[in-house]
Image (cartoon, rainbow, N blue to C red):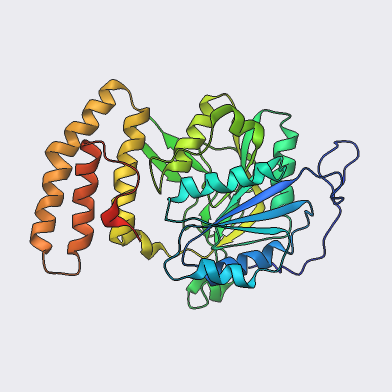
Amino acid sequence: MLRSNNMPKTNKLDDDTGLVDGDPRRQPSVGIVLVHYNCLEDTRRCLASLEQLDYANTFVVIVDNASPDGSGLSLQSTLENSKVTLILNPENLGFAAANNVGICQARAHGAEFVWLLNPDTTVEPSSLSTLVESIQSGQGSIGASGSKVLYFPDPESDTSVLGEDRIWSAGADIDFEAQRLSMRGNSEIDTGQFETSGAADYLPGCSMLLPFSTIDLVGLMPEDYFMYFEETDWCTMIKRAGLELRYEPKSVIWHHFADEKMQEAFSVYYYNRNERLFWFRYGSLRQRISLVFRTVTQTLPRTLRAFMSARGTVHAPVFRAHFLSCVDFLFGRFGKRRVFSR
């Protein structure tokens, strides 16, 4: 069940370990970065939950990615909290680039850690302090730490009626040999099967805490994906730099995520194009040749036939998006695709 955000703020001091406590004078400063795009109510709900954190030494940087609905300007007119900074990008720069703007702003404000958080999340009070403790306990060996992410309960779903929590992500695994990526526990009922803290191959960018020492080592989030797979690439860079990615189940956030949006043409284009880019970038020569060969001889003709058959129907934009994702991958066209801009 969803935990209450009105829990009392607790002091987490452990004098023997020297880990984070409830005194902001002794806590490392954390900059919380939210990338906002046409999601005013989500962002407001997220900010309200952040006010309940038991970790005091924080500030928030909201980066509005030129929201066409004007919600960035609406935020500007309503924000009263001095601990919240709003940056209005002149255009939609993509997820990675907007996060990088926020990361640089957090550094300029003196943050020692940056917490990348989706605005369509609701956080539990101890979610951040647990992540900070996780990284501190590694004494420099942990490059980033991520939360257990649960679907926000849908009041009309069977699981909500039964009072069961459904997992969105409990960390993720990457099989580079099979070129397969999977989020642990996705859509499973949370029965305690992912309650052990441990290493992950990548951490979803909806809740990921990094010390700036990690960013100094590997650089900012790669921007050539525009959206989808940028944090997967970044996490791979962190692991290959010799640092651990740590999944922390006691850090819990709720994701107001609709799976249906992944079936939209916009998402289909960027996900499929960028998935190929990721596997090509990290594949062996044999895997790269095989990926290109399959794309040319199998996927491209199949998606073209599907698009031609679906012309004039509601499904045509999705098949067109998949077809163009293959074409642009083959021709090395990455970053923002104007025809798939919002």
Q: Residue at x 84, y 50 (%)?
A: 24
Kindly indicate the quadrant of the structure image that contains residue 340: bottom left
| 134 is higher (above) or lower (below) than 69 | above
Residue reaching furthest to the front: 90
Kindly indicate the quadrant of the structure image that contains residue 164: bottom right
Residue 319 position within the rendered picture, expressed as x and y whole percent measured from the top left: 19, 57
Residue reaching furthest to the right: 15
Q: Is residue 6 left or right of residue 76?
A: right
Q: Residue at x 57, y 66 (%)?
A: 43
| 265 is higher (above) or lower (below) than 71 | above
Residue 225 position within the rendered picture, expressed as x and y whole percent measured from the top left: 38, 43
Evaluate whether residue 96 shows in this view: yes
| 243 is higher (above) or lower (below) than 272 | above
Residue in the foreground of this view, choosing between 41 and 86: 86
Q: Is residue 339 left or right of residue 243?
A: left
Q: Is residue 297 left or right of residue 140?
A: left
Residue in the foreground of this view, choosing between 70 and 213: 70
Residue 339 position within the rendered picture, expressed as x and y whole percent measured from the top left: 26, 56
Residue in the foreground of this view, choosing between 198 and 271: 271
Residue 233 position within the rendered picture, expressed as x and y whole percent measured from the top left: 45, 36
Q: Residue at x 35, y 61 (%)?
A: 342
User: Can you say which quadrant of the picture contains the N terminus?
Assistant: bottom right
